[in-house]
Amino acid sequence: MSIGIATSGFWNNINVTGGGVLPSVPVDALVGTITTTVIEGTITSTSIVGVIDGCEVGDIIEVARGEDRTLQLTIKDAAGAVVDITGATVTFTVRRRPQDPVLIEKDNSGLGGVTLVDAANGRADIDIQDTDTGPLNVSDYKYDVFLQQADTTRTQVIEPSIFRITSRITVLS
């Protein structure tokens, strides 16, 4: 396990002894004691990542406002081998900012919109409909993808990245 120490910038959402949270504090303003809590058990890191349509991690997904689009997701491990996602739930979420209400959410469970097309080879399709993107303003949003495996292990396979809604010229009736 490693612990990063910030020497400049801001710490966000700092829990305060006795209750409460400091929302954002400049690092140079922090003075005091750092307390850690020992957690019994095993912490594992498996580095499972998702790739959409051949994009690199952190790439921007662009969808025209009112467009239907199928995003092809492949989930791989750190060595680049596909991960069997049989029995897993894949959840795709879009928000304006991480703390804002959900604007688009899809999964292969109760919500629908995600299909495990080749689970043994880590493949899922995320269906974005015109009704998902039509109400959104032309702007940048944030999306991520979580994988909940059959054993209930949850992994963020795509970290928050940009989901861009672009304008369109053609108006369809």
Image (tube, helix red, strand yellow):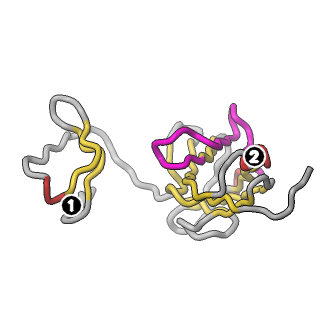
> What amino acid type is highlighted by mark number 1?
Ile
Magenta span includes 98: yes
In this rendering, position of residue 17 left or right of residue 134? left
Residue 122's disc is: none
- Compare residues 5 and 99 and report the one nearer the observer: 99
| Magenta highlight range | 94-118
Magenta span includes 168: no
- Compare residues 143 and 38 and report the one nearer the observer: 143
Residue 57 location, x and y as percent?
Answer: 54, 66
Identify the residue position indicated by label 2 in the image.
115
Residue 23 location, x and y as percent?
Answer: 29, 44
In this rendering, position of residue 104 left or right of residue 25? right
Q: Evaluate whether residue 88 shows in this view.
A: no
Q: Secondary structure at mark 2?
A: strand
> What amino acid type is highlighted by mark number 2?
Thr
Identify the residue position indicated by label 1 in the image.
5
* Residue 150: quadrant of the picture: top right
